[in-house]
Amino acid sequence: MEQLSSRLLALSPSATLAMSQKSQELKAQGLDIINMSVGEPDFFTPDHIKEAAKQAVDNNFSFYTPVPGYMSLRQAISEKLKRENGVDFSPAQIVVGNGAKQEICNVILSIVEKGDEVIIPTPAWVSYFEMVKLAEGVNVPFLCGQDQDFKITASQLESLITPKTKVLLFCSPSNPTGAIYSKEELAAIAQVLAKYPRIIVIADEIYEHISYCGELTSIATFPELKDRVVIINGVSKAYAMTGWRIGFCAAPLWIAKAVTKLQGQYTSGCSSIAQKAAEAAYTGPQDCVETMRQAFERRRDLIFGLVQQIPGFSLKSKPQGAFYVFPEVDSLFGKQTPDGKTIGNASDLAMYLLEQGHVAGVTGDAFGAPKCIRFSYATSDKNITEAMARVKAAVERLK
């Protein structure tokens, strides 16, 4: 007899991973599927990073690692944050984990109690909501539409704050929209948060190097939020190291200690070899990052133009960062597929495009934006062109 915990039963499966799995199943059946559902760079890890991993193997880095990560890696991250972001976190304030996803969850589990409210500007990454559920917190989503570039304003944020508000959790550059908060927008948000010293900010900056609008500002740079911001980042996106599973949080010391305590009980330190590779990523040449960024920018321009040609797809401005487009598609709701099924929502459309157009995207419902659908352009120009042609053809078959 199955007796799953209520904790597990409350969680929803990852929509991005579910769609990716579905596309793999169809591929296994012999169908030519273009998978644009997962945010994974299609580049190989740069050679100097791979060489560092090989050297780590040869140098016998094969023993348990410190729970918060090797000191040399945390020092490298500390120096990176000073150099690139203008923020000062000591190695003791940095915890390295099995990807940025684990570190976000670690922080939430460490500071959110039952009934605490977590404000999440949406559209937002699918896992945020489930992590808050796991901590028995209360999700407070606020839908930010295209008319405000998918970003929450300072006044909107303040209207959501209650005595139970514990965390503001947001991502810039954004998954799924590619939106980036400007220095001025963050300054206004910081002024609001300065009035509420209990609120912790979790700033997911995993896409920071995939930006098309110049220098980014971290909300951790504002002095009124000193000792209240947790930065989340990692090597997956910028260095094409998704499978290496290295992310980190840089946090107030009390949070870093709590995360270390928690991590020590269920995963301990992460891979010794992957950590040495990540150290090389942060300390080695950075030209590889710019090369990939330029490729993503070219792909962004390509897919943006192609999306404009798809009937019923609305995407008003080019994404400023990351590698996703997130058009509104609600004008297609109510239309009929060639076999007589009704497209009732974005989930129906995503499944139709997968099964009949052979292109995998992700429904906006998963991101808290039910009018939209997400496509990742972290793939080749050829795949982007072919995929959008298939989507256009499939949409034009709707009645």
Image (cartoon, rainbow, N blue to C red):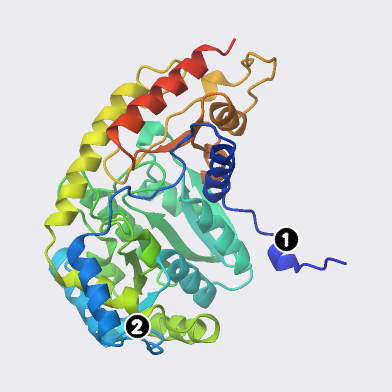
Q: Residues within 10 Å of mark 1 (few under 14, many from 20)?
A: few
**Is 292 or 358 nearer to us in this picture?**
358
Horizontal arrangement in the rendering, residue 30 relative to residue 153 (left or right): right
Identify the residue position indicated by label 2 in the image. 69
Q: Residue furthest right?
A: 1
185 vs 366, left or right, is: left
Which element type, helix, strand or loop, lies under badge 2? loop
Is residue 281 at least partly visible in the picture? Answer: no
Q: Nearer the viewer, mark 2 or mark 1?
A: 2
Whether 329 is drawn above or below 337: the answer is below
The answer to whether residue 195 is above or below residue 157 is below
- Mark toward the start of the polypeptide (2 vs 1): 1
Can see residue 337? yes
Q: Residue at x 83, y 66 (%)?
A: 2
Above or below, 309 against 27 in this view is: above
Q: Give the residue type that dot 2 points to.
A: Gly
* Gap in angstroms between the C-alphas marked 2 and 1: 32 Å
Q: Name the residue tied to disc 1.
A: 9
Q: Position of residue 143 (x, y in %)?
A: 49, 42
